[in-house]
Amino acid sequence: MATDQPLRDHYRLKWIPVGLTAEQMEAYRGYLDMTEDERSVIGKTVTNEELELLLELETARAMYVEPEDRQPGSITEAKVARYPERYNWK
């Protein structure tokens, strides 16, 4: 069974909205990388259907968990490097 995890990790999304292909996701990448103010301006210029898709993409990005943080319990070198303030044991 094929998984879309590499694609989700590439775009930092918890899920890929139903029906979107990798090519379509690339078209929305610029939107996801915009600031909140820039996305707000874009949101006022699109149809309701496209706005729903954009909001779903924003939600999927907000809920994304980095690969290093997906396996709780073990303190790995990647976690220490990513969050040194958390693991500063004295």
Image (cartoon, grey):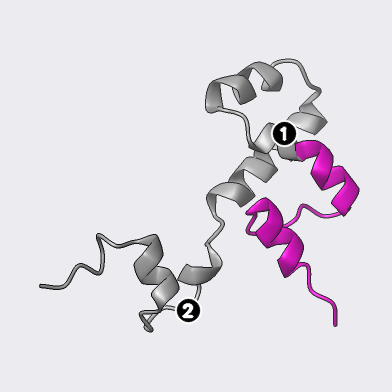
Find residue 30 and name its label: 1
As for residue 5 lying within the magenta part, the answer is yes
User: Where are the magenta residues, as a range?
Assistant: 1-28
Residue 19 relative to residue 45: left or right = right
| Residue 15 picture location, percent across and down | 69, 59
What residue is rendered at 79% in x and 74% in y? 3
| Residue 29 picture location, percent across and down | 73, 40
SS class of the residue under badge 1? helix
Residue 40 relative to residue 53: left or right = left
What residue is rendered at 49% in x and 70% in y? 68
**Where does label 2 land, which residue?**
71
| Amino acid marked by disc 2 | Gln
As for residue 7 lying within the magenta part, the answer is yes
Residue 37 relative to residue 48: left or right = left
Q: Residues within 10 Å of mark 2 (few under 14, many from 20)?
A: few
| Amino acid marked by disc 1 | Gly
Tell me the CA gap for discs 1 and 2: 29 Å
What residue is rendered at 63% in x and 25% in y? 39
Please report whichever mark, 1 or 2, sits nearer to the chain's N-terminal start. 1
**Nearer-the-camera pick, 82 or 47:** 82
